[in-house]
Amino acid sequence: MTISVRGIGWLTKEGYGCVRNGLLHRYEVREGVHTLPGKDIFSHPFKNFGRLDTISKMTAYAVSLALRDAGVEYSPQLKQDIGIVGTNAEGSLRSDIEYFRDYISAGRTLSRGNLFIYTLPSSPLGEAAIHFGLQGPLLYAVDESNALAGVLDMASEMILANEAPLMLAGKAEAEEALFFVIEQDRGMNRAVLCDLAEARSAVATIPDTAGLVRKFLQLHDGKA
Amino acid sequence: MKPVVVMAEMVTPYGTGTDACWNGLLAGKSVISRVERFKTAAFQSDYAGIIGGLRYHGQTSLVMQMLQSLFEGVVVPEDAKLLLATTKGEIDLLEQSMLRNRGDVSDAVISRLFNKVADLTGARGGGLVVSAACTSSAAAAAQAAAMIRNGHADCVLVVACDAVTEFIFSGFSTLSALDKRPARPFDRNRAGLNVGEAAAYVLLMSEERAVRENRAVLGTLAGWGLSDDANHMTGPSRESEGLILAIQKSLVSANIGPDDIGLIGAHGTGTVYNDQMEMRAFHAVFQNKERPVYSIKGGIGHTMGAAGLVEMIIALRALREQIVPPSVNLGEPDDDARGWASGQPHAVRERTLGLVTNAGFSGVNTALVVA
């Protein structure tokens, strides 16, 4: 069984976009990842987006762009058997610090539930699952070397084991994020970017997100 | 290739070893006790499942102390891949840094735990840390089995660990999730969960390699299903559709039907909503045909990321011994659990399969079929 990359959504310090559908937005002065108007990214209003932690926001942006690139329509009411596997370098460390600092400042007696829920590294994926109606497998995975390759491998194992027909796999850091949509290649001239082995090779050799985006844009242009 | 379990062990509040946990459960004994590790006066409860003899805020994190005791004298194949499952890993190191200015907060990043566990266990085949809230270790076991079934590995060590710390306890307290007494899963008067701590491991191999190495087979991970409710961050779905989907996927993965399942090791946290959600799913999948359901969390508390693996090992033991353990602390089953859950151990039919279910924050669900 061959697995293909059907779409990629990305955000860097310079801009955001999709690989296959040509969307490329470069930030103007005073614009950046933390000032993005959600309406430009999400096809449906994202309930309580402002209360999400930074990694959850970045995850949601990149997933939305990746689904758009793959031509997958969504709505919170429409639940689909799509899984999501995500990674990042520090897990929930920022949210851990924020939660525990708040708890200490309250005299170690009271804490805030809305901070505690983001102290799980899988919580940003959970927020994405709720908004995008993702009902497939959900997990966070990381190692100390190339975690993006690891989550691509894990998502591919899930497709091969028939755990979900379509998987999102990617990473979300505080200022950049990149998610792939991958699926079993069904042939029939279905439009895909490349096979997973090619993407896996790029991920294994190019460590930075901006470099990966350039590589995949070149790959797409070469095929266009 | 068929994934089989060739080694499995645990350390729980009952003590070191599966025997200690199994015998404690069969005796109907709860080891949930009052917490002395940190002050609990401001919290909703002062009960938790604590492992005796661990040093809090010492030189070594709680989970590493558990794992050191668990792997003492254990020889793991050097080529084993490692999947390490946890929710908060060494979060006590972050506490120490922020409360006592000892060490750095980044010492608590869970990826750092991977190399420590690889060094401790001798598993040198690479791998990942897996975190999926309270389904972490069940999800890791499922992925280990998928790697073997897909022919991408023939030996995977799944390690699970989580510890009771002030960070975690305060969080569950603020969510009003804790019972003021030892938890009573599936009981009519249940009022919440108790957090607990544990570490466990399972060594999965392809059946071919297990035979080649003349290994004793403890059981099979025959099927699995993972899903998400896509509904709410902390509360389970009121329709149970996520868990129903996970169970249905696990049955398809195992190539069996609902009638092949003879016992269910449930997540059974003791919260009103979780236990209700699970029973609704069991009624739906098994079409109201009763079968034994039990939870071990009245005995040891909710061991978070370690829960799935501990519960998988107990389910394998239950199948081998042909005994369904009691749900410790269950007095009067709730209406939906009557005829399914029991406070007494009883016999299970021969040649049956077990289902192990888990659920967690973000709406995650797992179902494992064990044989």
Image: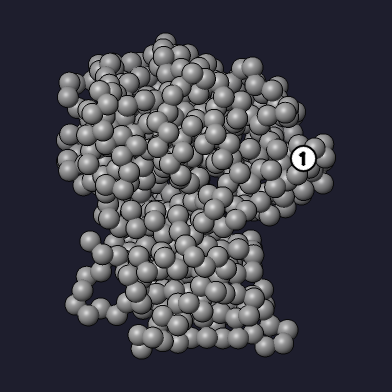
Q: Is residue B316 left or right of residue B22?
A: left
Q: Quarter of the image containing the N terminus of chain B?
A: top left
Q: Chain of mark 1?
A: B
- Position above or below: B133 against B18: below
Asked whether residue B174 is in view, the answer is no
Q: Nearer the viewer, residue B122 or B248?
A: B122
Q: Tell me which residue sits at (63%, 46%) in the image.
A: B109
Residue type marked 1: Gly
Asked whether residue B312 is in view, the answer is yes
- Position above or below: B359 against B210: below
Q: Is residue B100 left or right of residue A190?
A: right
- Position above or below: A194 against B147: below
- Residue B337 screen position, x and y as percent: 34, 31
Q: Quarter of the image containing the C terminus of chain B?
A: top left
Q: Nearer the viewer, residue B313 or B227?
A: B313
Mark 1 packing: few (<14 Cα in 10 Å), some, or many (20+)? some
Query: SS of the residue at dot 1?
Result: loop
Q: Tell me which residue sits at (68%, 83%) in the image.
A: A31
- Residue B333 screen position, x and y as percent: 38, 26
What residue is shown with label 1? B103
Quadrant position of residue B328: top left
Q: Is residue A183 left or right of residue A218?
A: left
- Position above or below: B349 against B179: above
Colouring method of the image: one colour
- Residue B54 screen position, x and y as percent: 65, 21
Q: Is residue A203 left or right of residue B318?
A: right
Q: Tell me which residue sits at (36%, 45%) in the image.
A: B143
Quadrant position of residue A11: bottom right
Q: Tell me which residue sits at (31%, 48%) in the image.
A: B152
- Residue A204 screen position, x and y as percent: 47, 62
